[in-house]
């Protein structure tokens, strides 16, 4: 049913099926107030025999009241060299609770980029860690956390014996756009990328890229 909306400037806009005329709509990001929107993109290498259930990447909310709201999460891999035996790689995304201590061994703390000047200093309340760039078969260790009983998302890829000759394979792990409810992390909650199936390459040739965006908000 067609209807009309009068905007703050007194302009009347027709909505619904009114004459099938298009309506110009501008979507706005989450209102961050004195906090901000951030993005982190990192690359590291899987070891030849990457252990099953080894931790590759985490984000933890350290703030007592601010919330971390995911806005985009992409992951990609590229086989950059030759492996003796092809194998199936599986990376799972888990939600974490009781995440009171970030991993301390085999870790890198990446640089975080604010999406606009004047936003709160990076990384806000987020503690991000990823596997050391050179890789480690045991993954990251030393943290205190509890995984949900099942994964929230999964990425599988076939690692062929020959080096890839195409662009890296990417996938979206979360569809937190266009009205879907995002992951909202309170204090000591987080997200984890875990390597599920033990690797069987013969060299450290499989690159992993984790590209994550989020907003830190006082309320959501």
Image (spheres, rainbow, N blue to C red):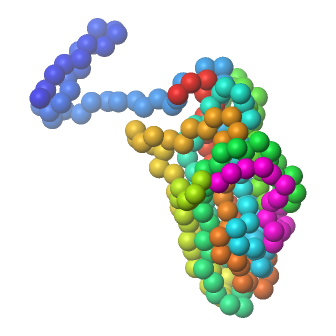
- Residue at (54, 42) in percent of width and height: 183
The residue drawn where x is 75% and y is 73% is 51
- Looking at this view, is 200 or 169 the one in front? 200
Q: Quadrant of residue 114?
A: top right
Q: Residue at x 51, y 31 (%)?
A: 29
Q: Is residue 138 left or right of residue 163?
A: right
- Is residue 39 at least partly visible in the picture? no
Q: Look at the image and say whether residue 142 sits in the magenta stretch.
A: yes
Front one among 6 and 67: 67
Q: Main secondary structure of the magenta part?
A: loop
Asked where in the image residue 127 lies, by quadrant, the reply is top right
Q: Position of residue 218 (x, y in %)?
A: 61, 23
Horizontal and vertical percent position of residue 171:
53, 61
15 is within the stretch colored magenta: no
Q: Residue at x 77, y 68 (%)?
A: 45
Magenta span? 132-147
Q: Would you place residue 24 above or below residue 174 in this image?
A: above
Q: Quadrant of the N terminus?
A: top left
């Amino acid at each position: 049913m067609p209807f009309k909306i009068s905007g703050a400037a007194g302009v009347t806009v027709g909505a619904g099926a009114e004459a099938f005329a298009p309506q110009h709509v501008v979507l706005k990001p989450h209102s961050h107030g004195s906090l901000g929107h951030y993005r982190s993109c990192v690359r590291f290498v899987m070891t030849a025999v990457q252990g099953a259930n080894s931790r590759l990447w985490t984000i933890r909310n350290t703030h007592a009241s601010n919330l971390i709201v995911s806005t985009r999460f992409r992951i990609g891999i590229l086989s950059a060299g030759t492996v003796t035996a092809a194998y199936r790689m599986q990376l799972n995304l888990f939600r974490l609770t009781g995440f009171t201590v970030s991993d301390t061994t085999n870790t890198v703390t990446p640089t975080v980029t604010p999406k606009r000047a004047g936003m709160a200093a990076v990384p806000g309340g987020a503690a991000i860690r990823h596997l050391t760039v050179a890789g480690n078969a045991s993954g990251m260790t030393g943290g205190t956390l509890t995984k949900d009983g099942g994964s929230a998302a999964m990425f599988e890829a076939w690692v062929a014996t020959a080096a890839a000759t195409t662009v890296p394979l990417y996938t979206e792990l979360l569809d937190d756009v266009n009205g879907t409810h995002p992951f909202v992390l309170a204090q000591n909650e987080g997200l984890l990328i875990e390597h599920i199936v033990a690797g069987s390459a013969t060299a450290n040739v499989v690159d992993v890229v984790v590209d994550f965006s989020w907003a830190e908000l006082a309320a959501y």
